[in-house]
Image (spheres, rainbow, N blue to C red):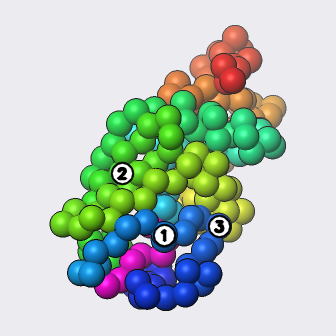
């Protein structure tokens, strides 16, 4: 099974990692927690077409973590989707101005990750080479045939930009 599983009664110091910690409320029936739940929630990208490429481009162009976190808040926007975790459990992720909240169905478990935590986790996935799939990486490579450098993406807008005017996009941050 991909992912590390922790027992609920594990030492809280052992559960901390770059992609969040598991300190949310658990019921007695929630015996196991998927340690990398945040990775599973954010790896598909935002809910907008091309979001994953925009996010990857952001990390190539922007070095300031606070600006990336604010940009991510705008990219993900307000909304949510259902999630099926690799351990088979189902839940929901809700995105809003506070961050990403993960809920497990049939459970009282709820954990909110601040945008700064989401930003840090995406950065870790990119550094580890696990954010983009092999197919995504091929698409990324194909995008830059006509560009001299990585255009700065706008949250939830077409990427890459289509013309030279669009090439000068700003974040609105």
Cα gap from disc 1 to disc 3, whole angstroms = 14 Å
Q: Is the residue under label 3 in contact with that under label 1 (CB below 8 Å)? A: no
Query: What residue is rendered at 64% in x and 41% in y?
Result: 69
SS for dot 1: loop
Q: Quadrant of residue 94?
A: top left
Residue drawn where x is 38% and y is 67% of the image = 25
**Residue located 43% across and 88% down the image:** 9
Q: Residue 134 carries which label?
A: none
Viewed as shown, does residue 115 lie left or right of 38?
Answer: right
**Element on which disc 3 rests:** loop
Residue in view at x 30 percent, y 54 percent: 92
Return the disc, 3 or 2, that comes first in the chain's sequence. 3
Q: Mark 2 points at which residue?
A: 93
| Residue 7 spot, x, y in % from top left | 42, 88
* Residue 115 drawn above or below residue 84: above
Q: How many residues crowd mark 1 within 10 Å: few (<14), some (14–19), many (20+)?
A: some
How far is mark 2 from mark 1, CA to CA?
17 Å
What secondary structure is found at the residue carrying circle 2?
A: strand
Residue at label 1?
23
Q: In this view, does 50 lie above or below 136?
A: above
Location of residue 155 (image quadrant): top right
Describe residue 93's horizontal placement relative to residue 77 as left or right: left
| Nearer to us in this view, 57 or 141 | 57
Which residue is under mark 3? 18
Image: magenta residue range:
31-37
| Quadrant, the N terminus | bottom left
* 35 in magenta: yes
Q: How crowded is mark 2: few (under 14 residues within 10 Å), some or many (20 or more)?
A: many
Going from N to C along the chain, the mark reached first, 2 or 1, is 1
Q: Is residue 173 visible?
A: yes
| Mark 3 → mark 2, Cα distance in angstroms | 19 Å
Label 1 vs 3, first from the N-terminus = 3
């Amino acid at each position: 099974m991909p992912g590390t599983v922790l027992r609920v009664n594990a030492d809280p110091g052992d559960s901390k990692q770059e992609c969040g910690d598991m300190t949310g409320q658990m019921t007695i029936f929630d015996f196991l927690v998927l340690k990398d739940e945040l990775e599973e929630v954010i790896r598909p990208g935002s809910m907008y077409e091309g979001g994953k490429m925009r996010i990857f481009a952001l990390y190539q162009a922007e070095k300031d973590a606070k600006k990336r976190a604010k940009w991510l808040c705008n990219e993900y926007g307000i909304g949510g989707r259902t999630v099926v975790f690799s351990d088979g459990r189902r839940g929901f992720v809700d995105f809003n101005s506070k961050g990403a909240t993960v809920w497990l169905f049939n459970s009282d478990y709820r954990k909110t990750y601040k945008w700064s935590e989401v930003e840090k986790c995406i950065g870790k996935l990119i550094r580890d080479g696990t954010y983009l799939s092999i197919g995504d990486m091929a698409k990324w490579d194909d995008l830059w045939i006509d560009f001299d450098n990585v255009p700065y993406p706008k949250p939830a807008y077409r990427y890459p930009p289509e013309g030279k005017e669009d090439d000068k996009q700003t974040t609105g941050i």
